[in-house]
Image: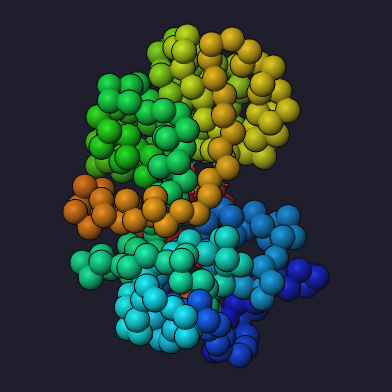
Amino acid sequence: MKAFIFHKKAKAEKMKLQEVAKPIPKNHEILVKVKAVSVNAADYRSMQLGIVPVKGIFGADVAGTIEAVGSAVTRFSVDDDVVADLSGQGFGGFAEYVVADEHAWVLKPKSVSFETAASIPMAAVTAYQALQKGNLREGHKVLICGAGGGVGNFAVMLSKLSKAEVTAVCGLRNTDIMRQLKADHIIPYQTTDFSKETGRYDLILAVNGNYSLTDYKKVLKPDGVLVIVGGSLSQLFKSIVFGKLLFLGSKQLHVLSAKPSTADLQRIIDLVESKEIIPHVDRVFMFHQTIEAVDYVKEGHSRGKTVIVVE
Ligand SMILES: NC(=O)c1ccc[n+]([C@@H]2O[C@H](COP(=O)([O-])OP(=O)(O)OC[C@H]3O[C@@H](n4cnc5c(N)ncnc54)[C@H](OP(=O)(O)O)[C@@H]3O)[C@@H](O)[C@H]2O)c1
């Protein structure tokens, strides 16, 4: 099969399209013909940090069709369409085929396309777990910083579904998407500073960008919660090192470490199937353009999700 293999020690192009052996599923594993795979920050950030999957193949969010099952597999059959976040299974999606434990996968509904299904797992589950961590409730005022990307889009949709009042901080080019997603207030970060209105929010999700912890703290209500999801490495570093000290008192800070969860993924897939949320796929690349797709997401300005279709 063809796969994009990451070569840590290569000087120039680290990901190369190569012919490698098609994997064979062990007892509890399934072999999936990859139809679509989406790109996440986890792909390029792991590459930058030199954290390479065992087989050297990145790509976590996979949707495809089962071609073979291991002898002990009970949950799936050949020809089932499935979707998964394989970041906890050694990645492997930037390839024509991938094997992973049957418990990593959920069934893809027929009405959801492979492209849409691949856009869901990591971004949507991260957004869901961030809102859980922040104890989101109906009527809460939520600020989502970095609402234009994959996690941010899902955070806006899931917050609206919970009947929260959503303020989205995004770039000017993403304000149209925020209107489509029914954000109540839109703050374009190039022209407006969200930190002017003090004591306003019950919950802040810091998804992207690089803002000061004191600005976030200032705009939280006295019992408000800040959940650091992502953004610049300096924002993450400051949150881990100084966060606890700065948030002594009633306002809370949590640094999220999202975990793949088939239960959470199933919840989101159900919402997509019932059209309660509609994932926004920004750009679709073909398999041979995988390096281009990763470079595009790495620039940090993708809108919604970026998906690769495997021919
Ligand atoms: N904690 C966890 O467990 C976990 C799990 C998954 C992901 N993450 C992290 O979450 C973050 C978001 O992931 P993602 O997949 O959503 O990334 P993404 O899709 O690449 O996000 C791109 C978006 O970020 C926006 N953005 C860039 N700079 C901004 C700024 N200063 N203010 C507001 N928005 C800004 C861009 O909007 P413009 O083009 O308008 O600038 C673009 O729409 C990443 O840092 C990732 O590492 C964390």
**x, y percentage for residue 48?**
71, 56
Q: Is residue 216 visible?
A: yes
Q: Is residue 98 visible?
A: no
**x, y percentage for residue 138?**
28, 25
**What is the quadrant of residue 17 in the picture?**
bottom right
Query: In this rendering, would 20 be left or right of 296?
Result: right
| Closer-to-camera residue (154/137) | 137
Quarter of the image that includes the N terminus:
bottom right
- Residue shown at the point (52%, 64%) measured from the top left: 86
Q: Is residue 247 above or below residue 138?
A: above
Query: In this rendering, would 19 be left or right of 101?
Result: right
Q: What coloring was used for the rendering?
A: rainbow
Q: Is residue 250 above or below residue 55?
A: above
Q: How many marks?
A: 0
Quarter of the image that includes the C terminus:
bottom left
- Residue shown at the point (53%, 15%) measured from the top left: 251
- Residue shown at the point (63%, 39%) measured from the top left: 232
| Closer-to-camera residue (230/244) | 244
**x, y percentage for residue 85?**
48, 61
| Closer-to-camera residue (220/270) | 270
**x, y percentage for residue 92?**
56, 72
**What is the quadrant of residue 286 in the picture?**
bottom left
- Residue shown at the point (32%, 62%) measured from the top left: 116
